[in-house]
Amino acid sequence: MLDDIEREVQYTRKMIGKNAFDPRVMAVMSKTPRHEFVPKSYLDAAFDNGPLPIGHGQTISQPYIVALMTDMLELEADDIVLEIGTGSGYQTAILSQLCKKVYTIEYIPALADAARARLQNLGYDNIESITGNGYDGWPEHAPYDAIIVTAAASHIPKPLIDQLKPGGRLVIPVGRPHLYQELMLVEKDDEGELNIRDVLGVAFVPLQGERDEHV
Ligand code: SAH
């Protein structure tokens, strides 16, 4: 799986502007048991570099995309991270090994419950999760050093920008649901100004329950 990710980094190097991901990200990708996060019927494909169905019409993201989004966040050990779209909990587990605390929100109660139990059983102990609409963020624990959205939004939700620390980074796929989106990196500088950049064309399942609070 690691070789496949490295190969895809090479294919996409012009778009993503780098030849390799942070070795800390790759180390965590290598030691996280992805087979624990996929349905039993897909165990054979657990270490392929592709997305897989996890039920309820949702998917566990492709490993290359998980590594890319994690790399884009440039996490530090002390960071507090918000994740929207827990899904299987795989991306959550990756993030949790690179920061101090992950708060994660999942819209579908059955997926949220399964991911919570899975992450606890596997011993990841710096994660707090809730069922809810991530469009609104999780104001109680804001502001966050980094925010990651793993479902396709039609626009950047203002509540998430409001909950991002100055100096913080937000990674989010933005575009037309069910078609393709641009993976965007939003940096908030120390004065609160936003710098927004398109990084790569991607395809995510839609962000549900969107409201109309544009940036
Ligand atoms: N990172 C996950 C990706 C799961 S797919 C993984 O790799 O397993 C995207 C997830 O976002 C789905 O589980 C979907 O239910 C969830 N989702 C969609 N809209 C949401 C919303 N408004 N708030 C929280 N989660 C949402």
Image (cartoon, grey):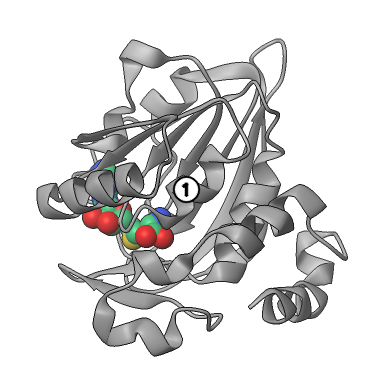
Numbered disc 1: secondary structure: helix
Q: Which residue is mark 1?
A: 93
Specify whether 56 is left or right of 24: left
Ligand 1 closer than 8 Å to the CB at disc 1? no
Q: Position of residue 175 (x, y in %)?
A: 44, 59
Tell me the kind of residue under disc 1: Ala
How would you rate the neighbour count of disc 1 (Cα within 10 Å): few for under 14, some for 14-19, many for 20 or more?
Answer: many
Q: Residue furthest left?
A: 110
Residue 22 visible, this angle: no
Q: Is residue 156 above or below residue 24?
A: above
Residue drawn at x 65%, y 40% is 73
Q: Nearer the viewer, residue 210 or 126?
A: 126
Residue 62 in view of the camera: yes
Residue 197: x %, y % from top left: 68, 47
In the depicted structure, whether residue 36 falls above or below residue 12: above
Residue occupying the point 68% across, 57% down: 199
In the image, farthest residue toward the bottom: 44
Name the side, left or right, on which 162 lies relative to 11. left
210 shown above or below 176: above
Residue drawn at point x = 21 percent, y = 37 percent: 133
Quadrant location of the N terminus? bottom right
Report which quarter residue 6 is drawn in: bottom right
> x%, y% of residue 86?
33, 48
